[in-house]
Image: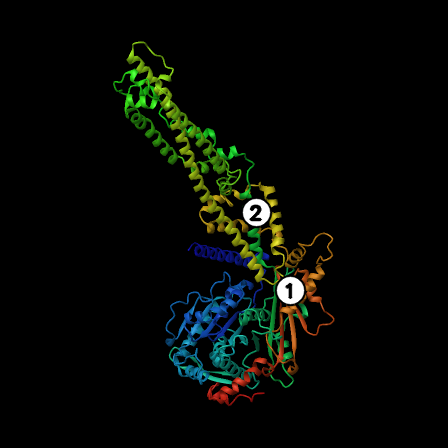
């Protein structure tokens, strides 16, 4: 149970750390020109996600745009599906997890406020402002289970349902009005860019012409121009359990897409529906349905699977949209900054990927980014700060054992003060002299021992008196003093005078190791036990002495006086040692109480220090895991470099504000007390202090390439020939970006006759690396290179565009044909009835 609780607690701490790191990464993304460093889009943008399978991509795309576009809060997202929200969430949970956490951690859910949807049979719409989800009422269609006529039935069911068209009209008009509300965020409202995203094997894309044209028609009532692109996501890695039908359905859609992109493609349908149920035709003149079509796979051009699967293509979709719709900002002189002749030109790109026969060419893209690993940095700095503070807490003061005993109230003087007053103040011996005695002659007492003489004189009276008036009172006072002023309370009082002594010292001092307070206390107990045994032996010896051997004064012929003198002798020789014995017993009892309390103090302080140490382990584990998740090259030496950076920052702060600045109430305060409240409270305070005092410091805000160069060389000693120069670094970065920005589609190179490429860097205008990248391979490159400047220094990105291929050039097309043919031969109808005969023969 304890192990399970610790595991759960550690998971909670790690979640808090991940949020903290994500928040720091987000802040770094937004830095520059007081928050204006991000790009802005010029015209409004709408993302239309078609199908249930692309639902997880909505929140990913939204979060990327929110982080990277200054007016990203004004972008609108629509997802049209057939499943209720909970079913979609459960089915696609794993897909969501594949998107790398740079954009998922701390993200606002793309589906906030969608709980309580109406039953899908009636159609339903939900939105959170930016994201609108519309469920088509195709209740008679089981879209989650293949059937021989699934795509055909989806098409028929949509057109047979007046309610489906009416609900969709209402939703899209609401979306159009919502876009108008964001008008102030854009430079121009003349045009709108629509980005349609779908999975090739999703049955709902059979309605792509209807959904696209209805969206364009409604938006055209508010905008002078509507430009629509399509991004088709194909999955080759996930086809394990349902590879056959998925491949056949995907190929069916690609055939339909080829038809839609023909120069002679036309469309007409009664899609506009008024509130009175009147249908109005929507037409599309002879031209391709989409301006550009991008095919994006979960395998790259080399045939290698993409980490994160098809969800990774969310980055590409967002960067293409920015490239085509980026606002050109004015510089300090008032002129509009430009990347010159290498600015992206959509018309030029379309013309270059069109074949000589005017057959439509398709496009794809690859994306790579190299950035300062902000999450690992935040976690590494946090870990090194905490480790330093923990080392400060562990430092032993240069105290002697006497000082330590005095801190805990266990020194000789303190113990004596405790023992003082335990025994009654009055003269015990004279007090006992009045005890009634038996009538015994002195001559009868002479041959007896002192013990026998006492019993002959007092019976049990003397012992009873001593027990009732001395022993019990002393025992009560010992109990009272041990409960009134415990060792822990004394230690807490002493800590106010000596705040440098905390629970690490308590744990060490209360342990039984060499030189500890516990060892000294046990030594005192041993010494006191020896004294007690000596006192007991002395008392026993006294009680065995004979009366006639005592040296008290005797009177001739005065028996009673001799008895009285014997009584005085008896009290002096026996009960005075008994009082001393009682004092030693009570002192030993107090010391044993202290020993028990010292054990309890050790258990308490050890638990706290183990908790503190456990937090250190969690911080280190989380930082190491975050570094491991980063690119091996980009994440190198994070712990080593930021250990030194943190050490330098701490030294500078302490030089300015004093060595104890960390433990001021406005910063960490009393970390010992915080630790007793649980690691979550301590971690929260630590994260706040680290963020305020360290993460905002200048050494953590250097340009990414300079930071990477410093980290790469942090382990290099002076004179080492392996030192990495800036030119070496730039060459590595340039090569790494090119290798990682491989186009996300597999084609047969030998059949692709019209390959055309454009490559774009996104980065800081003042970056030395951007200047290097813009001129690298200037004389040998055979592709167009552009640079998109942004006011941020946290990293650089590269977008590779490639186009000119045909669908039959795709591996997924060729691999899917065998399944398409087989399913067709087995009676599967993969196209709507009126469309099958219009499709071109398969090439």
Q: In which quarter of the image is residue 379?
A: bottom right
| Nearer to us in this view, 540 or 394 | 540
In the displayed structure, 36 sits above or below 478; it is below
Q: Which of marks 2 and 1 is nearer the N terminus?
A: 1
Query: Residue extending furthest front?
Result: 447
In the displayed structure, 64 sits above or below 441; it is below
**Residue 687 visible in the current orientation:** no
Neighbourhood count class around disc 1 (C-alpha, 10 Å): few under 14, some 14–19, many 20 upward: some
In the displayed structure, 330 sits above or below 750; it is above
Rendering coords of residue 515 (x, y %): 53, 37
Residue receiving disc 2: 388
Query: Residue extending furthest left?
Result: 439
Rendering coords of residue 516 (x, y %): 51, 38
**CB atoms of marks 2 and 1 within 8 Å:** no
| Nearer to us in this view, 677 or 726 | 677
In the drawing, does residue 549 fall left or right of residue 807? left
| Nearer to us in this view, 578 or 311 | 578
Rendering coords of residue 749 (x, y %): 65, 80
Q: Quadrant of residue 113?
A: bottom left
Residue receiving disc 1: 337
Query: Residue extending furthest top?
Result: 556
Quadrant location of the C terminus? bottom right
> Residue at 58% of width from left, 64% of height from top?
39
| Nearer to us in this view, 544 or 48 | 544
């Amino acid at each position: 149970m304890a192990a399970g609780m610790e595991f759960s607690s550690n998971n909670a701490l790690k979640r808090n750390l991940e949020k903290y790191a994500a928040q720091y990464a987000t802040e770094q993304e937004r830095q520059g020109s007081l928050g204006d460093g991000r790009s802005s889009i010029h015209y409004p943008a709408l993302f239309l996600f078609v199908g249930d399978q692309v639902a997880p991509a909505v929140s990913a795309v939204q979060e990327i745009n929110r982080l990277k576009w200054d007016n990203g809060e004004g972008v609108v997202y629509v997802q049209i599906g057939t499943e209720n929200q909970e079913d979609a969430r459960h089915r696609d949970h794993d897909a969501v997890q594949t998107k790398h956490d740079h954009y998922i951690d701390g993200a606002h859910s793309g589906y906030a406020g969608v709980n309580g949807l109406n039953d899908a049979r009636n159609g339903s719409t939900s939105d959170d402002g930016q994201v609108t989800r519309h469920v088509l009422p195709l209740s008679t269609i089981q879209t989650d289970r293949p059937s021989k006529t699934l795509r055909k039935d989806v098409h028929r069911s949509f057109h047979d349902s007046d309610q489906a068209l009416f609900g969709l009209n209402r939703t899209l008009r609401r979306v159009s009005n919502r876009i108008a509300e964001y008008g102030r965020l854009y430079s121009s409202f003349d045009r709108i860019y629509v980005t349609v995203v779908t999975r090739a094997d999703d049955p709902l894309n059979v309605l792509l012409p209807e959904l696209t044209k209805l969206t364009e028609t409604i938006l055209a009532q508010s905008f002078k121009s509507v430009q629509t692109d399509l991004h088709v996501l194909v999955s080759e890695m996930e086809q394990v359990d349902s590879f056959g039908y998925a491949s056949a359905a995907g190929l069916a859609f690609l055939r339909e897409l080829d038809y839609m992109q023909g120069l002679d493609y036309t469309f007409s349908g009664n899609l506009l529906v008024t509130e009175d149920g009147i249908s109005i035709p929507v037409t599309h003149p002879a031209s391709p349905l989409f301006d550009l079509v991008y095919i994006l796979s979960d395998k790259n051009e080399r045939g290698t699977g993409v980490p994160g699967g098809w969800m990774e293509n969310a980055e590409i979709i967002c960067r293409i949209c920015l490239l085509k719709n980026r606002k050109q900002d004015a510089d300090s002189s008032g002129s509009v900054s430009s990347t010159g002749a290498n600015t992206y030109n959509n018309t030029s790109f379309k013309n270059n990927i069109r074949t000589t026969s005017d057959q439509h060419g398709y496009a794809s893209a690859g994306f790579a980014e190299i950035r300062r690993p902000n999450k690992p940095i935040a976690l590494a700095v946090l870990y090194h700060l905490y480790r330093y503070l923990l080392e400060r807490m562990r430092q032993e003061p240069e105290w002697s054992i006497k000082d330590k005993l005095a801190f805990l109230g266990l020194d000789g003087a303190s113990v004596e003060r405790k023992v003082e007053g335990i025994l009654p103040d009055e003269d015990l011996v004279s007090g006992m002299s009045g005890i009634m005695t038996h009538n015994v002659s002195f001559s009868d007492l002479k041959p007896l021992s002192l013990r026998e003489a006492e019993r002959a004189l007092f019976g049990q009276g003397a012992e009873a008196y001593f027990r009732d008036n001395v022993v019990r009172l002393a025992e009560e006072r010992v109990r009272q003093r041990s409960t009134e002023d415990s060792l822990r309370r004394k230690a807490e009082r002493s800590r106010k005078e000596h705040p440098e002594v905390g629970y690490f010292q308590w744990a060490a001092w209360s342990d039984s190791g060499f030189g500890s307070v516990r060892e000294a206390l046990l030594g005192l107990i041993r010494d006191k036990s020896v004294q007690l045994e000596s006192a007991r032996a002395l008392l026993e010896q006294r009680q065995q002495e004979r009366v006639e051997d005592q040296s008290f004064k005797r009177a001739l012929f005065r028996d009673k006086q001799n008895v009285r003198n014997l009584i005085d002798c008896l009290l002096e020789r026996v009960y005075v040692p008994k009082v001393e014995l009682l004092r030693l017993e009570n002192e030993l009892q107090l010391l044993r109480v202290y020993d028990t309390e010292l054990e309890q103090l050790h258990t308490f302080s050890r638990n706290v220090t183990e908790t503190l140490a456990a937090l250190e382990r969690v911080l280190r584990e989380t930082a190491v895991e975050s570094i491991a998740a980063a690119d091996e090259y980009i994440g190198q030496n994070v712990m080593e470099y930021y250990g030194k950076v943190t050490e330098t920052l701490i030294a500078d702060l302490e030089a300015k504000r004093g060595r104890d600045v960390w433990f001021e109430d406005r910063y960490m305060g009393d970390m010992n007390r915080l630790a007793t409240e649980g690691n979550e409270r301590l971690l929260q305070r630590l994260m706040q202090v680290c963020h305020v005092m360290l993460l905002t410091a200048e050494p953590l805000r250097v340009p990414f390439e300079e930071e990477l160069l410093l980290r790469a060389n942090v382990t290099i000693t002076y004179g080492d020939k392996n030192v990495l120069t800036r030119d070496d670094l730039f060459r590595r970065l340039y090569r790494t970006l090119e290798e990682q920005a491989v186009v996300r589609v597999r084609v047969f190179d030998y059949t692709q006759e019209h390959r055309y490429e454009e490559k774009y860097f996104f980065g800081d205008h003042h970056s030395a690396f951007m200047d290097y990248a813009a001129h690298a391979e200037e004389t040998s490159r055979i592709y167009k290179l552009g640079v998109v400047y942004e006011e941020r220094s946290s990293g650089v990105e590269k977008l590779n565009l490639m186009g000119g291929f045909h669908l039959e050039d795709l591996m997924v097309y060729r691999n899917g044909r065998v399944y398409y043919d087989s399913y067709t031969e087995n009676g599967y109808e993969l196209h709507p009835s009126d469309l099958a005969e219009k499709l071109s023969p398969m090439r």
